[in-house]
Amino acid sequence: MDLGIRKNTMPHHSHADGFAAGLIVLVVAVSLASLMVGWGAGVEWLVRVSERRSAMVPGPALCLALIAGSSLLFDRGPYRAARKVALAGALVILGFMILAPHLADGPLDTWLLSGSGTADGVSRAAMIGLALAAVAPAVRLGLFPVSGEWQFHIPLFGLMVAVVISGLVAFDPLTFETLGLFRHLSLIEAVLMSLLFGAQVLQHHPDEVADLPGRSI
């Protein structure tokens, strides 16, 4: 059955796209498992790696799943439309996470922002990472009128930063908790963002950039 996934004439493109798709499916699966089973059914190890670590709260988990889904290379009519809807949904949730605490009179304890009733929250670093992760699918879908090279350079930058942060969070979480930008950052979030950025880097084919909307002449 033809699902509209892009077919490449170059074998190395097919291999790279296949590996990227596998990484993206993994990100979606883990994010949704954390959201529905971890928070929904109270399975603690799906939201945090240990009881003294920060959790990935529902808002970032849902955003990650939607942005990853919008990054899949399914281009035929209904699939492309679904990718746009997923990306738009992620941006709406991300906007809520950014603006809601500033618009409220006091600390906002909602399920999306804290999992309700826990000391966890949304990391500023996670919000920046999610915004960067949304760039590549936005460029591919023609929603961000910039040079197609952005779909490579932004994920590459995100990948390098996310990998370094994943290592630091894994080995020195207490230090990170004292830094405002990284407060509440979950190791699960950092690793999933590394995988998503890596997938987006693998999806970049320089010979196809000229065909993308927004390519500068």
Image: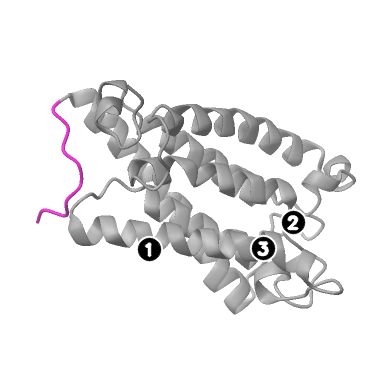
Circle 2: residue type: Ser
Work out whether mark 1 precedes mark 2 in sequence or the reverse, and give the earlier one. 2
Q: Is residue 90 magenta?
A: no
Q: Which stretch is magenta? A: 1-9
Comparing labels 3 and 2, the label whose residue is closer to the camera: 3
Label disc, if present, on residue 97 of the rendered structure = 3
Task: Give the image quarter of residue 159.
Answer: top right
Structural crowding at the residue carrying mark 3, measured as other residues with C-alpha within 10 Å and reported as few (<14), some (14–19) or many (≥20):
some
Does the rendering let one see residue 114?
yes
The amino acid pointed to by label 3 is Met
Residue labelled with disc 2: 50
- Between residues 7 and 101, which one lies in front from this camera angle? 101
Displayed quadrant of residue 115: bottom right
Mark positioned earlier in the residue sequence (3 or 2): 2
Query: Where 8 falls versus 173 (above or below)?
Result: above
In percent of width and height, residue 2 lies at 11, 53
The residue pinned by badge 1 equals 85
Give the quarter of the figure containing the C terminus.
Answer: top left
**SS state under label 3:** helix
Residue at 51 percent across and 65 percent down: it is 33
What's the coloring here?
A: one colour
